[in-house]
Image: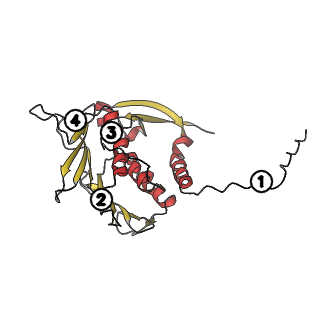
Amino acid sequence: MPHDIDVVLVAPRYLAGPGDPAWVTVPLHRACRWSTAEDPLVPRVILTSPDQLAQLRIAPDPDPAEPWWTLRHAHHGDQRAWSMTFDAHTPVEIIAAVTDALTAPAPPPMTPDDPYEPLRAANWHAPRHHDGHTSPEGMSSPDGLARVDRTLHEDGRTANWIVETSVHHRPAVWRAYVDGNTPPQLVTALFEALADTEPLVREPHRVPQLAVTHGRTTTGKVVAGTLAFALEHRTAALVQRHTPASPATPPCGPRASRPRRAR
């Protein structure tokens, strides 16, 4: 018989804590057919795209400030090689927004000319320096806990992105680095996920203290099956995204009448 379990809704989502890595890895493997490199002697996960151009690597590190997640793409055609990294405490839903955009069957028809557009729409603003001037190369969340900065790349032509969540100048809770050659639609997907105001669902024992003290948490109940099958439903939706629509069956002669239901 279905029963309810306790959950916590956490907002803003960048304070929600890491979540389950399977939210990213399972759909990549099952829906997008990324292959796995299994080595039971090494505590890491490596997934490679079918065309062998992209790779996602999860390598746990004792230092939580070091990147656990690395997403790389090789040079191909006019697209230069690029990479993105995420620390251990990055919410998996934010990483999944990027991998979902990467594996989409077709890129979006348009991406914003201003990469900060999704953040501006969510009332993010240019942060102020100690001298009172704003920085045109950065954006800060309304609560001041998350920030995006742009730094000039070594080649002098492209700029890297740095995303960081931190509190009162303490060490960063999590940080992400985005290569300046990363396709614009992936940068947009990342920023949209950051700006999304929809709370994330976490089990009570997995809610970070930072979310309790600096975020908004709401306790609720859901049917156990809803939480248990959330990943399956997500994977099935992505499978459907990659499944070509069946061609419509042409009409063949007069339309048959439906049989009458027996009483």
- Precedes in sequence: disc 1 or disc 2: 2
Q: Is residue 211 above or below residue 49?
A: above
Q: Secondary structure at mark 3?
A: helix
Lateral position of residue 39 relative to residue 68, left or right: right
Type of the residue with mark 4: Ala
- Residue lying furthest left in this view? 131
Mark 4 closeness class: few <14, some 14–19, many ≥20 residues within 10 Å: some
Q: Are marks 1 and 4 in contact (CB under 8 Å)?
A: no
Residue 126 disc label: 4
- Residue 72: image location, x then y, percent: 33, 61
Lateral position of residue 58 relative to residue 125, left or right: right
Q: CA distance from mark 2 to mark 4?
A: 25 Å
Q: CA distance from mark 3 to mark 2?
A: 22 Å
Q: CA distance from mark 3 to mark 4?
A: 12 Å
Mark 2 closeness class: few <14, some 14–19, many ≥20 residues within 10 Å: some
Q: Are marks 3 and 1 in contact (CB under 8 Å)?
A: no
Type of the residue with mark 1: Pro
Q: Which residue is mark 3?
A: 117
Type of the residue with mark 2: Ser
Classify the position of the N terminus by image quarter. Answer: top right
Q: Are marks 3 and 2 in contact (CB under 8 Å)?
A: no
Residue at x 41%, y 35% (from the top left corner): 199
Type of the residue with mark 3: Glu
